[in-house]
Amino acid sequence: MKRIVLFSEIEKNTNSQDVLDAIFPNELENKTMLFMPSGGINTNYQHYYDEWESYCKNYGATFELVDNSIPPEETEKVASELEKIRHSNILVISGGDPFKMLYYLRRTGMDKEIKEFVNKENFVLAGYSAGAMILTPTIAITTMEVTNHEGNRVPIHDVRGKSILSELHNDLTGLEIVDFEIIPHYEVKYANDVELYRKSSKNEVKTCTDNEFYIIEK
């Protein structure tokens, strides 16, 4: 069982049951799930932690959080979090700010640990929204321009919340775990902009509405 699941969101997804069945497959034994919040563990997002913990209970999986935001100088804490990834077989990466997430992953070495995760004999790696984007070759779609509510042309990422780590914008390399790019939260109104972006990218570019998902069997 080697599986990657990419989607945009879970709560409002009309196919949420199919997504959850893919993340918690019957054939995967001793389900041990880690939930990775994109920007580290924060009590403001307790709702999401409770939500995923309830999914785990429904599927007979253990639940634990993994914190990617620990400063690298706190070596023992970083090592402890890396060990969690090594001993889990389901890893779910949340949405949020893809720049911030990649920054945290790189400084803790979790980027390399996630790449090792997909070399396991049995695993499910799931990412939604920005968590899906970072698993691709590049997050360059954040630079794709669309028209906002005011009629101005802005990068699509700015429509959903501007990154607070602009110094990272020069390095758009993802984890390259899948070989295509993904545009989460896709809407038909972005169709022309997406076609223009496709022409500028060397990778296959897939769109993903809030009700769609992709399953990649390794």
Image (cartoon, helix red, strand yellow):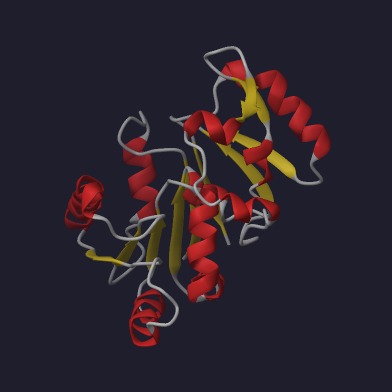
Of residues 168 and 49, the one nearer the viewer is: 168
Residue 41 at what x, y percent from top left?
29, 60
- The image position of residue 143, as x and y in percent, is 67, 38
Of all residues, the one furthest to the bottom in this rendering is 76
Horizontal relation, residue 76 to residue 198: left or right: left
Up-down: is 79 above or below 4?
below
Number of labelled discs? 0
Quarter residue 61 falls in: bottom left
In the rendered image, which quarter is residue 181 located in? top right
Residue 112 visible here: yes
Look at the image and tell me whether residue 4 can be seen.
no
**Residue under the point 60% across and 12% down:** 151
Answer above or below: position of 213 versus 193.
below
Residue at the location (56% across, 19% down)? Answer: 148
Task: Write the residue at 33% across / 56% down.
Answer: 24
Q: Is residue 43 left or right of residue 24?
A: left
- Locate residue 63 relative to residue 135 in the image: left or right: left
Percent position of residue 132, x then y: 52, 49
The answer to whether residue 59 is above or below residue 183 is below
Q: In this view of the protein, which residue sits in the foreground, 104 or 50?
A: 104
Residue 218 x, y percent position in the rendering: 58, 62
